[in-house]
Amino acid sequence: MPNQPIPSTPEPYWRESAELPSFPKLQQSLETEAVIVGGGITGITAAYLLAKEGVKVVLLEADVLLNGTTGHTTAKITTQHDLIYDELMHHIGEEKTKKYFRANDEALAFMRDYAANVSCDFSNQDAYIYTTENKNVTKLEKEYKAYVKLDADCAMADTLPFDLSIKSAIMIRNQAQFHPISYLNQMVQELQEMGAEIYEHTVAVDAEAFDGGAKVITRDGSHIKAKHAISCSHFPFYDGNGFYFTRMYAERSYVLGVKTRQPYPGGMYLSADNPTRSIRATPMNGEDLILIGGDSHKTGQGFDTEKHYESLELFGKVHLGLKETVYKWSAQDLITLDKIPYVGPVTKGKPSILAATGYRKWGMTNGTAAAMMIRDLVLEKENPYQDVFCPSRFIADPSIKTFLSQNLNVAGHLIGGKLDFGSRKKIEELRDDEGALVTHKGQKAAAYKDQQGCLHLVDSTCTHLGCEVEWNHGDRSWDCPCHGSRFSIDGDVMEGPADKPLKKLNTDEA
Ligand SMILES: Cc1cc2nc3c(=O)[nH]c(=O)nc-3n(C[C@H](O)[C@H](O)[C@H](O)COP(=O)(O)OP(=O)(O)OC[C@H]3O[C@@H](n4cnc5c(N)ncnc54)[C@H](O)[C@@H]3O)c2cc1C
Ligand code: FES
């Protein structure tokens, strides 16, 4: 069969293959016990766990449920989070590293139990991290030693069942994979049965803490009063002087769903090399759909994004016998200073406003672990992992270096972006289906000429904190390199932290 071109519209397999109920927009103010903002794995699992405990829950979603990062994940459920444990042992010590591991391992066990009664293509799989480069062999050996200290069920390996020559690999047994939307859809149904209120198309724009509670304010001016307000909005919708925008950055990755000539051997794979490669399969109409992920970069700094899909496709052809690409999609996740998520009170003085974010592309277990911590915080129950994940924890020195380099990079985009008028295109130079930063009436602007030659022109200043957006051709979106906000060709917010659209500019005068 001749190779098909990579599909032009990015759409994840998960969203195309599952049907979700829809929910109304919130039209009035409400009072409840817990108001949760964000309908991804964290928000839905937290809502489910709280409702199970008899807590009255309201869940707000800006768009539709499960169309954020959770709808665009590769959905490996594993404690093998890239190379992390040796590094954590050095930075936070063995005891806290064990806590990070156990929190995720318990989340995996919870998901396995829950999935036992849900039709969600859940299957147990071994997870491998491998390297094809000599220079990374020592890193893997150190990681293996850390696994042994963690009592992980693991082994070293020197081959993989692909046409891929590796130098070394570590396998961790009895991990899992699933269809994330089918799994979470079951929780949504149970939430409805338990009387939880769910609202879509409802954007939370602010929160306030008061004595004994908190309230969330929506863009339309509704107020939801509760004992706890919980941000599960990926980037926290409310900062509360936690300065999250200085403590996290967003990284984008790409995924292809492909068919291959040879049968898939089973297992989940991740390379420790650069660029990263992530591989797993999922059942699709009686055959295997192989997911190939990777090519990560800081959001807004990926340049020609189509190239990322092409490099994944090339990898698939060379090593996996790729014969047809049927899906492509991309998404981003947030990375914290010390690579451990922030879960707990948004700031020290505001115990009634909780936040959960920063999963570093390991949000299936981390998001579930966060939901379990949120449940315990709301119920005022002790949780053994809170100290490791608490957003106001002390951060050890090595990550401060990361903090400085990440923020210098962000500052570069704030300052450099504004001054860099010279390299801008002229609007009349744009070809059909091309986006670029342009100069329009002496002002910086973001212009996209669509496939029909129609011009879409918006202000290029991100409405979060004023960085310059960059064109993402793979997704036809404007992405902000500073904290990962994303906007449509007409400036509408696709992903926060920005909650206001880019200003539309008059195309008649262009
Ligand atoms: C390409 C890719 C592959 C990945 N693969 C894996 C993997 O194999 N295994 C793994 O463990 N992890 C993986 N991850 C990470 C994982 O998918 C994420 O960490 C996780 O899905 C994040 O879940 P969340 O609930 O925090 O956020 P989301 O799923 O993004 O949900 C947040 C929701 O909040 C809503 N929202 C935002 N702002 C507001 C507001 N102001 N008001 C109301 N609602 C709002 C959004 O619309 C969204 O629906 C991957 C990530 C990427 C990018
Ligand atoms: S996302 Fe923060 S400035 Fe754009």
Image: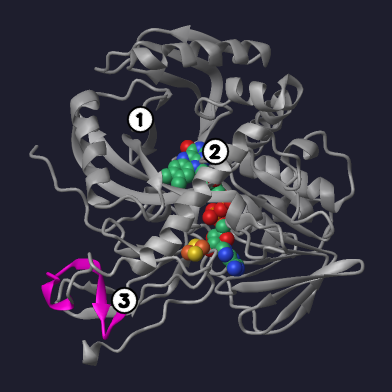
Within the magenta stretch, is there residue 310?
no
Q: Residue 353, percent across and down?
A: 78, 61
**Residue in view at x 71 percent, y 56 percent:** 47
Q: Nearer the viewer, mark 1 or mark 2?
A: 1
Which residue is pictured at 55% across the width and 25% down the height? 175
What is the secondary structure assignment of the residue under circle 3?
A: strand
> For disc 2, does the CB lie below 8 Å from ligand 1?
yes
**Is residue 432 shown in magenta?**
yes
- Ranked by sequence position, the earlier of labels 1 and 3 is 1
Closer-to-camera residue (410/270): 410
Numbered mark located on residue 362 in the image: 2
Q: Residue type at mark 3?
A: Ala
Establish if 8 lies above or below 490: above
Q: Position of residue 194 (x, y in %)?
A: 75, 60
Mark number for residue 274?
1
Q: Is residue 178 left or right of residue 281?
A: right
Report the side of 442 relative to 49 (left or right): left
Q: Mark 1 or mark 3: which is in front?
A: 3
CA gap, disc 1 and disc 3? 34 Å
SS at mark 1 in the image: loop
Q: Quadrant of residue 195?
A: bottom right
Magenta span: 427-443
Residue where numbered disc 3 is placed: 445
What's under tag 2, amino acid-wise? Trp
Please identify the quadrant where the C terminus is shown: bottom left
Residue 113 lies in what quarter of the image?
top right
